[in-house]
Image (cartoon, rainbow, N blue to C red):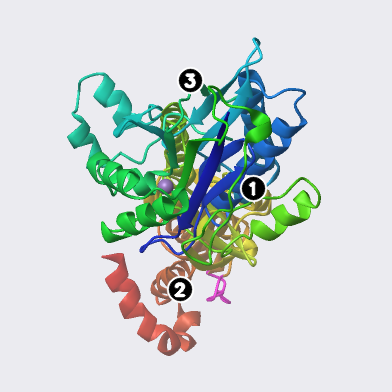
Amino acid sequence: MSKLVAGSATDMGLVRTTNQDQLLVVPGLYAVADGMGGHAAGEIASLTAVRSLRAAFEAAGQRSAQALLDAAKAANYAIWEQARANRDMFGMGTTLVALAVIERDDGTNGLAVVHIGDSRVYSFRAGQLHQITVDHSLVQELVDDGQITAAQAAVHPQRNVLTRALGVEPVADLDLINIEPERGDRYLLCSDGLCREASDVQIAAVLRQYPDPSVVAKELVALAKSQGGSDNITVVVVDVLANDDSSDGLDLRTIVPQDTTASTPAVAQEGGDNGLGATDRRRGHFPLWGSVRQSLRPLLTFRLASFVTALAVVIGAVLAGLAWYARSTYFVGLRQGHIAIFQGQPGGVLWFNPTVAAVTDYTTKSVLAYRVQGLQSGIAEPSLTRAWTVVDDLVAEKEAAEAANRPRRVILRPKSSTAPTTVPTVKSTVTTATGTVTTGRTATTATTTTAMTATTTAASRLQAPATGGTSKAGVRGQR
Ligand code: MN
């Protein structure tokens, strides 16, 4: 007969402001989860992982390796569903390592490990540390491919990038490992906050030094903190001990869970209960620390990250094109009754609204009535210069039309009998002038011409002094 005795510890570390790690220590089931996600999502992901794992494993008809795997998959779905339903939790996930006592088909007991992410399970047997799990991380893949060494992986800038995690996809790809335990074995479950700070040699030394698993857990946390403590540190140590009437093999009925030990008050743990009031205890033992937090850890799997990157490039190109299209042209329109020039497309494009480039003094009365509708919908032009030309043309068009329709204004109306000879002269001058000079100038010219003509008649002498001033100008203008 054998029994399992466990000790555990978790710590925020020296850099982070929250602890997103969770641990689970209940009879025959031990787990560590390292959550990731913005705000409180990382804590929720790891908390959901250990809670769902426990609930599903305990609800399973039997304690088999398959039941452990199914429980982890149920935990994955619970996280994924929560993330999908809550925008704040989008992309959250967690690592998970779980060690469970299982019953085999032949009735014997064994251990099984289920694993996803870069939290680890080690065995310590006969003084030798052996890593049982293989990280699901980008650097691990690079090491496997021979592209980098393990030493380079430890300092690689992308060493945080996971290739698999719990909760980021509806179905998780988990590793299941069967273990044939021996009395005297010691199993270590830990988050990367330990194994990234401390070397295997250092970890093995602590495992070798202390017989009490609770002391080992505390000492390992202290070791990681002494090495920098840059991440949350979580450790569960499980010892396979001989019972008094020792015989080979583990017996579930003889497994005695030991109280866990926390190295700081901010510890999540559960253990030692007998099922009654378990839910309440869980709630009490799994507080969420802090509601505001920024994840320092990439959330996405490598594959998902590639897809998101490609999508972002496409969306960026479309947006750039839209922005160019939306802002590249001008149009002439109306702003509060005034004719104005806008940059952009009439009516805007998506959220790219046109902006006012210039507002003129002209109003709808400055243009021909039938042009107003066009101004209301906007007259598009490829450049600011062309837009100004449109404004000028519209105003000139109205002025020309008005000039053409305007009753002849003959300031100097001949009152003598010579009028018949004078009038044709005036008429012809005005007609010629209309096409080239302004109305005012036309009148002046007409006056001048008339005056000059009139000086030839006796009846015009009274008008002569009054028009003398303009006469000179008129002559100058005529040249
Ligand atoms: Mn971590």
> Is 374 in front, or is 151?
151
Residue at 51%, 60% (x, y): give it: 262
- State the mark number for residue 447: 2
Q: Main secondary structure of the magenta part?
A: loop
- State the mark number for residue 324: none
| Picture layout, residue 300 above or below residue 11 | above
| Residue 416 located within the stretch drawn in magenta | yes
Q: Amino acid at mark 3?
A: Glu
| Picture layout, residue 360 above or below residue 52 | below
Residue at 31%, 33% (x, y): give it: 129
Q: Which residue is mark 1?
A: 87
Quarter assignment of residue 450: bottom left
Q: Is 199 on the left or on the right of 373, as rendered? A: left
Picture coordinates of residue 317, whole percent (x, y): 42, 34
Q: Amino acid at mark 2?
A: Thr
| Picture layout, residue 345 above or below residue 182 | below
Q: Is 205 on the left or on the right of 461, as rendered? A: left
Identify the mark nearer the N-term, 2 or 3.
3
Identify the mark nearer the N-term, 1 or 2.
1
Answer few, some or many: residues within 10 Å of disc 1's Cα (few below 14, many 20 plus, some between 14 and 19): few
Which of pointers 2 and 3 indicates the residue nearer the eye?
3
Magenta span of residues? 410-418
Q: Which residue is mark 3?
A: 180
Q: Is 260 on the left or on the right of 387, as rendered? A: right
Q: Amino acid at mark 1?
A: Arg
| Residue 98 located within the stretch drawn in magenta | no
Picture coordinates of residue 225, whole percent (x, y): 32, 59
How far apart marks 1 and 3 lie (CA) works out to 43 Å
